[in-house]
Image (cartoon, rainbow, N blue to C red):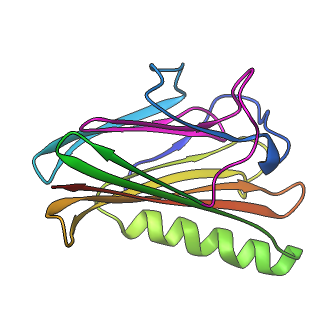
Amino acid sequence: MYTVSLDAPYLDTDADQLCFSLGLKERPALAERAVSLGGLDVRLRLLGASHQVFAGPVRETVACLQGAERGLPEACSRQLPGWVYDFGALTRRLPRGEFSTEVARILDRATDAEHSLCGVFPGSPEAVTAVVVEPATGPHGAGLVWRTWHTYPQNGQIVSTHSRLEAR
């Protein structure tokens, strides 16, 4: 695992500010990690309480984006040349104790993963953005699966995403 203390103020105030996009160019990153997995070069990028994952033909961004429609899709599927891509997101609001327990579980999961990037914001050890990527096999062929978590301790929200990229 690769964990960094992010040297930036915690700016996102609510999970509802997040937007989803495929194909955006690089945005300024607070931390980045490149890994090679399943024959693909993968770039994990933390943009604050948001992320970008670049893998094969995918340039996934979950971030506060000016002019974009707010909110994350519960599900999104795309057929890309030679690939199948699936994305899903879930936002939960948890009571304080449950929130702390879930953040600890996320940090443990990221710590145990070989290919991950986790950022913790100053001022709150529970303000976390984490990305974990792993190889995957499925009905279409080999590929990758990645999960992300964005935590908002000020209101007990956790946004989790799940993405899958498979060769066809």
Vertically, is 52 above or below 161? above
Q: Residue at x 54, y 19 (%)?
A: 28
Name the residue at 82% across, 57% down. 153
Q: Is residue 12 placed above or below 106 in the rendered structure?
A: above
Q: In the displayed structure, does residue 89 sit left or right of residue 157?
A: left
- Is 1 situated above or below 20? below
Q: Residue at x 83, y 80 (%)?
A: 97
Quick check: is 152 in the magenta stretch? Answer: no
Of residues 4 and 102, the one nearer the viewer is 102
Taking 113 as reference, is 51 left or right?
Answer: right
Quadrant of the rendered image containing residue 144: bottom left
User: Which quadrant of the figure contains the C terminus?
Assistant: bottom left
Determine whether 23 is above or below 96 in the image.
above
Magenta span of residues: 45-74
Residue 118 pos. (x, y %) = 50, 50
Residue nearest the viewer, comparing 108 with 24:
24
Residue 157, image x and y in percent?
Answer: 79, 61
Quadrant of the rendered structure where residue 146 is?
bottom left
**Percent coordinates x, y for residue 123 in the rendering:** 79, 44
